[in-house]
Image (cartoon, rainbow, N blue to C red):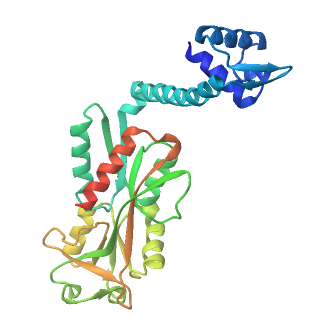
Amino acid sequence: MLLRQIRYYVAIIERNSFTAAAEENNISQSAISQQMAALEAELGVRLFVREGRKFRLTDAGKYLYEKGKVLLESADALVAETRRIGSDDEWKLNIGYLASYQGDELQRAVLEFSQIYPEVVITIFKGSHEQLYRALKDGRASIVMSDRRRAFSDEYENYLLAQSPAYVDVAPASRLAEVGCLTVDALASTPCILVAGQSEEGTERAFYADILGAGKDFLFAAGSEEARLMAMSGRGCVLVDSTEPASQPPLIRKELKRSDGSPIVRTYCAFWQKKRTNYYIEEFAMILRRQFAK
């Protein structure tokens, strides 16, 4: 009994027609009838009871149909997984992350993943929210770690990693370091330092000012280290992307709240295209979530 014969058989039942099943499988009606006759002969039982141009299934035929569908699903999954493992693209993982990200969860996740899957070549790059989105959309990124700014799309996996208060890093000499409950009102007279390229300044300013309500005066740095140095020199406070409440000295990390004292919640996710998903992307996302949960 050949797998091909089972596929023909299931198609006949689901199409309720020898002719339609033959067309679906790109063979002639006479050929598919011969295959069914050979299948019945090999099994030694009747599968069909023909009644003119129609047919009905015997009990053996019903059993073969139900089990045959399961067998075909397993076979298709086996083929897909084998092709996935043998595909060159599956051995590469391009990971993007926010340029303003200051946590160590990503580093720990990459280390753990590489120890489990040493055969996978990992490349890592950083960018703004918009740069990461474009890289994901055009296929340059396999998966990106970013904050949520758009409504979730059905075209992407929107894999929640963590939800965290909003934080700012301030210099010890800053007046903000002495404030007990730091609210967005306190930032009205203090420049907020953001990590963004020149082309992204408008987008970042709009998000932090209009969506988070954090600050009115913004300065921009090319990277996290430059932003920290600007804060140390007294030029402003750094709006950071991190779930960690403690900052690296000498800066002091403060939770930022709304005017009424309610928390500002940041949502961080792993995003990847559903149509490009594979085993390694899903595994890395799960490892990354575990690192955020520690």
Above or below 27: residue 212: below
Residue at 26%, 49% (x, y): give it.
Answer: 109
Residue 286 relative to residue 249: left or right: right
Q: Which image quarter holds the N terminus?
A: top right
Above or below 7: residue 277: below
Q: Picture coordinates of residue 53 (x, y %)?
A: 85, 21
The image quarter containing residue 193 is bottom left
Residue 189 relative to residue 205: left or right: left
Asked whether the viewer can see residue 22, the reply is no
The image quarter containing residue 16 is top right
Residue 96 relative to residue 233: left or right: right
Asked whether the viewer can see residue 55, the reply is yes
Above or below 45: residue 222: below
Residue 194 relative to residue 32: left or right: left
Q: Which image quarter holds the C terminus?
A: bottom left
Give the mark count: 0
Foreground pick, 281 / 180? 281
Residue at 49%, 40% (x, y): give it.
Answer: 276
Q: Picture coordinates of residue 25 (x, y %)?
A: 69, 20
Foreground pick, 81 / 252? 81
Residue at 42%, 31% (x, y): give it.
Answer: 89
Q: Picture coordinates of residue 273 (x, y %)?
A: 50, 47
The image quarter containing residue 64 is top right
